[in-house]
Image (cartoon, rainbow, N blue to C red):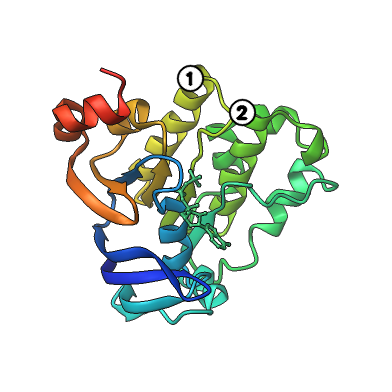
Amino acid sequence: MLEVTDVRSGYHGLEIVHELSLTVAPGEIVAIVGANGAGKSTTLKTIVGEVKRFGGSVVFDGKPVVTGRSFDLARAGLMLVPEHRALFGSLTVEENLQMGTWGKRDRVGFSEEEILDLFPILRERRSQLAETMSGGQQQMLAIARALMGAPRLLMLDEPSTGLSPKLTWEVFHAINAIRERGVSILLVEQNAGQVLELADRAYVMESGSVVLEGTGTELAADERVQSAYLGV
Ligand code: ATP
């Protein structure tokens, strides 16, 4: 579904991501874990064409992705929920959800009621302004809004940022339910402990490169991962 091959990218000519390759198969949850500044967000932004690629290729659904055309990509069903969530703060929950439908085209995805079943708190707060909600609720709204566009691959940048471990589990539980409906997931996390339990496969990034990859279970058992990311 997504094939990233030998991608190099960065800012102002400075290479941050080096020869990075990764894949996401249909129905998979794939995680990229790594410390602050390892280049995880830059990788996601490069995939959607927001950050310029210096080399390598990104292929989504058999079609090459062209840098600078993230608009087309959302229409093709690849959606990124950025770390800062990019909600419309002065609009209500319901209005934010409606804004999510623009790229949907004729794809069939979740109905609004199904999305609200995944995130019941949003149903209770349908008429509340997004900016007055807690961080966890805003994260749920950002994911819910992306689902309104019927994505086939959903990319999430640090969905646990600012959330307690309990709320993180709630969000991860919803992510798993989304995958069970056939949507592939690529997510980036510093919080390796919880995400390795969720992910089918994961990549560990250090200084802009993938240094390890494996199933979530394999990586959680790996001594290097345990000492660097799991505090063991
Ligand atoms: P974080 O958890 O902090 O988001 P990350 O692994 O996602 O970490 P990136 O945000 O991709 O890391 O940052 C990787 C490197 O790129 C850092 O050195 C950062 O300073 C640099 N960087 C990120 N955004 C920009 C930008 N817009 N202009 C220049 N350099 C940037």
Sort mark 1 into few (<14), some (14-19) or many (20+) by Cα contacts within 10 Å.
Answer: few
Q: Which of marks 2 and 1 is in front?
A: 1
Q: Is residue 1 visible?
A: no
> Relative to 4, does residue 217 appear above or below in the rendering?
above
Quadrant where the N terminus is found in the figure: bottom left
Look at label 1 and name its amino acid.
Pro
Residue drawn at x 62%, y 29% is 136
Q: Identify the residue under disc 2.
A: 120
**Secondary-structure class at tag 2:** helix
> Relative to 207, does residue 196 appear above or below in the rendering?
above
**Secondary-structure class at tag 1:** helix
Residues 49 and 131: in front is 49
Q: Identify the residue under disc 1.
A: 165
Real-space Cα separation, disc 2 to disc 1, in angstroms: 19 Å
Look at label 2 and name its amino acid.
Pro
Residues 148 and 227: in front is 227
Residue drawn at x 28%, y 30% is 228
Residue 183 picture location, percent across and down: 38, 52
Residue 196 picture location, percent across and down: 29, 32
Residues 192 and 35: in front is 35
Residue drawn at x 64%, y 57% is 100
Pointer 2 residue Cβ closer than 8 Å to ligand 1: no
Q: Can residue 130 be seen in this view?
A: yes
